[in-house]
Image (cartoon, rainbow, N blue to C red):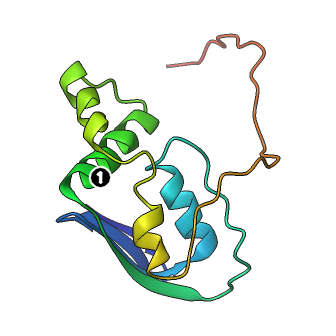
Amino acid sequence: MAVDLGGGSSYSLSHNQFQATRVRMATLADTFTRFVDRTVVDMTDLKGAYDLTLDFTVEDYTGLLIRSAINAGVVLPPQAMRALDGAAADPLSGPLRKYGLALEPRKAPLPIVVVDSMQKTPTEN
């Protein structure tokens, strides 16, 4: 799976690897949010665009894909959910250390949209 982020920036996920090309840290943090169970916020103050490759074990790679599906709202069968048992709770931290980066749990204010109610408005066909 390859994702073109525009401006020569992209990432791909295949063969137990995450590869990013010319990706800014804020974009990387947003991308990582898709693969973990919480929001990732860029607090590095790094301004450039970077290339990096993260290597994962088969179990952790499978866990990333399953968490991505869950975060996208895909309902998975129990067999897929059991595959998370073999994956690390935080599969990104180890590979990120190679670049001097770390994911640290913190409390931070995040924008949230709350929908109180919704009404169906008729539309013309």
Q: Which residue is mark 1?
A: 60
**Callout 1 amino acid:** Asp
- In depth, the one of 62 and 102 nearer the eye is 102
Residue 8 visible at all: no
Residue at 74% over, 22% down: 115
Report the side of 53 relative to 35 (left or right): left
State the image coordinates of residue 68 (x, y, percent, origin top left): 38, 44
| Above or below, 27 relative to 73 | below
Q: Quadrant of residue 20?
A: bottom left
Instruction: Tell me the quadrant of the picture where the N terminus can be found.
Output: bottom left
Q: Residue at x 57, y 68 (%)?
A: 102
Q: Is residue 70 above or below residue 13?
A: above
Residue drawn at 35 percent across, 29 percent down: 74
Drawn side of residue 101 relative to residue 11, left or right: right
Q: Position of residue 43 (x, y in %)?
A: 72, 69
Q: Nearer the viewer, residue 23 or 116?
A: 23
In the rendered image, is residue 68 in sight? Answer: yes
